[in-house]
Image (tube, rainbow, N blue to C red):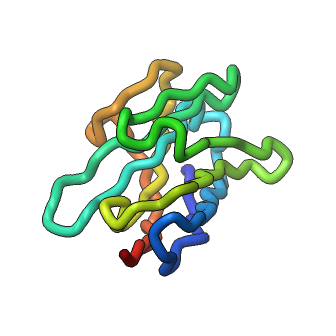
C-alpha cells in the first residue's frame, strides 16, 4: 500500500509564497506519477501540476505556470509544490495523488491514492 502525508498549508497574503510537501510511504515504486490537485471553494477538484518521479518531467495547469514549481527529494521520498505570487483564487484544499502508470493524467479519476489534503488560504 501507498500512503501520502501532506503538510505546509496555511494562510498567506496575496503575493506571498507557500511550500507544500507530500511524503510517499509504503510501496513507493508504485507511485511513478505524482500530482497536485486543488479543490477551490464551491468548485470541482482541478489539476495543478504533475511530475514523473523517474524522469523528473513536469506538466502544469496554465493558471499556475510561472508561479508554481514541483520538485522532489528522492532521499526523503517527498514531492514539493512551491507556490509563489499567490492570488486569492489559489485558495482551496490542496491534495497530492499518485498513479502507477508512467503516463501523465490531468483527471482526478486517473489517480488511485490521495493524501488527506492541506488548506491554503490567500487573503487579498
The residue under the point 21% across, 68% down is 41
Question: Where is residue 52 drawn, in percent x and y?
Answer: 60, 27
The residue drawn where x is 62% and y is 23% is 57
Q: Nearer the viewer, residue 87 or 68?
A: 87
| Residue 54 in the image: above or below residue 47 | above
| Relative side of 23 to 95, left or right | right
- In the image, 87 versus 112, the foreground residue is 87
Residue at the image point whose x is 14% and y is 66% from the top = 42
Spot occupied by residue 105 in the image (x, y as percentages of width and height): 37, 28
Q: Can you say which quadrant of the picture contains the C terminus?
A: bottom left
Side of 46 relative to 15 (left or right): left
Please identify the residue farthest to the left as the structure is shown: 42
Picture coordinates of residue 32 (x, y %)? 59, 31
Q: Relative to the observer, which residue lies in front, 42 or 11?
A: 11
Query: How many labels, in total?
Result: 0
Pinpoint residue 65: horizontal percent, then vertical percent.
Answer: 47, 36
Does 118 sit left or right of 74 as displayed? left
Relative to 22, residue 102 above or below = above
Extreme residue in the right direction: 75
Looking at the image, residue 43 sits to the left or right of residue 40; the answer is left
Residue depicted at x 43% and y 54%: 114
Quarter residue 119 falls in:
bottom left
Amino acid at each position: 500500500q501507498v500512503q501520502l502525508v501532506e503538510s505546509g498549508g496555511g494562510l498567506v497574503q496575496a503575493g506571498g509564497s507557500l511550500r507544500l510537501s507530500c511524503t510517499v510511504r509504503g510501496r513507493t515504486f508504485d507511485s511513478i506519477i505524482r500530482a497536485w490537485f486543488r479543490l477551490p471553494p464551491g468548485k470541482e477538484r482541478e489539476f495543478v501540476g504533475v511530475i514523473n518521479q523517474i524522469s523528473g518531467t513536469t506538466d502544469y495547469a496554465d493558471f499556475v505556470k510561472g508561479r508554481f514549481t514541483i520538485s522532489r527529494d528522492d532521499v526523503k521520498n517527498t514531492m514539493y509544490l512551491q507556490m509563489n505570487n499567490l492570488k486569492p483564487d489559489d485558495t482551496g484544499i490542496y491534495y497530492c495523488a499518485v498513479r502507477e502508470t508512467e503516463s501523465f493524467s490531468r483527471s482526478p479519476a486517473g489517480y488511485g491514492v490521495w493524501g488527506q489534503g492541506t488548506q491554503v488560504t490567500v487573503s487579498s
